[in-house]
């Protein structure tokens, strides 16, 4: 696949990026170089290779799922402009 100057200016317009004429010429070469590398990667045989998220295989540490804070609604509701029982009260926003 090859990118020409019209494609670069079109992409810049879609991305709303101001692009000078000299910059467009330079980007044509750079983008074509990047695409050639991507095409080379597509030629690799990846059959039987498991997908990876990192080069180091390890499990993420899990923490115990327990409540470590809370249990004092009076203190929390003390900051509320209005409260009813253990709840905040807010004005109605839907008519």
Image (spheres, helix red, strand yellow):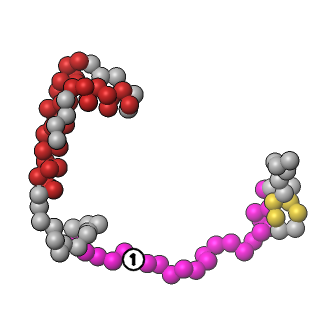
Q: Is any atom of residue 49 visible in this view? A: yes
Give the extent of the magenta segment.
Answer: 56-79
Q: In this view, which residue lies farthest toward the top?
A: 21
**Residue shown at 31%/28% (left/top)?**
10
The reply to whether the magenta stretch includes residue 61 is yes
* 81 or 1, nearer to the observer: 1
Q: Left of 46 or right of it: where is 74?
A: right
Task: Please name the residue that numbered disc 1 is placed on.
Answer: 61
Q: Position of residue 88 (x, y in %)?
A: 81, 60
Answer above or below: position of 26 versus 94: above
Q: Position of residue 59 (x, y in %)?
A: 33, 77
**Residue shown at 25%/69% (left/top)?**
51
Q: In this view, which residue lies farthest toward the front?
A: 1
Picture quadrant where residue 47 is located: bottom left
* 21 or 7, nearer to the observer: 7
Picture quadrant where residue 55 is located: bottom left
**Residue shown at 86%/55% (left/top)?**
82
The reply to whether the magenta stretch includes residue 60 is yes
Q: In this view, which residue lies farthest toward the right?
A: 84
Q: Position of residue 15 (x, y in %)?
A: 38, 32
Provide the secondary structure element on which disc 1 rests.
loop
Q: Left of 14 or right of it: where is 91?
A: right
Answer above or below: position of 9 versus 85: above
The quadrant of the picture occupied by the N terminus is top left
Q: Main secondary structure of the magenta part?
A: loop
- Counting labels gives 1
Q: Is any atom of residue 81 visible in this view? A: no
Q: Position of residue 31 (x, y in %)?
A: 19, 37
């Amino acid at each position: 696949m090859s990118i020409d100057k019209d494609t670069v200016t079109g992409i810049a317009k879609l991305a709303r990026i101001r692009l000078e004429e000299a910059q467009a010429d330079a980007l044509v070469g750079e983008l074509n170089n990047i695409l050639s590398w991507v095409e080379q990667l597509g030629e690799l045989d990846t059959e039987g290779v498991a997908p990876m998220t990192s080069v180091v295989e390890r499990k993420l540490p899990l923490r115990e799922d327990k409540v470590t804070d809370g249990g004092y609604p009076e203190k929390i509701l003390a900051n509320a402009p209005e409260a009813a029982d253990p709840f905040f009260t807010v004005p109605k926003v839907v008519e």
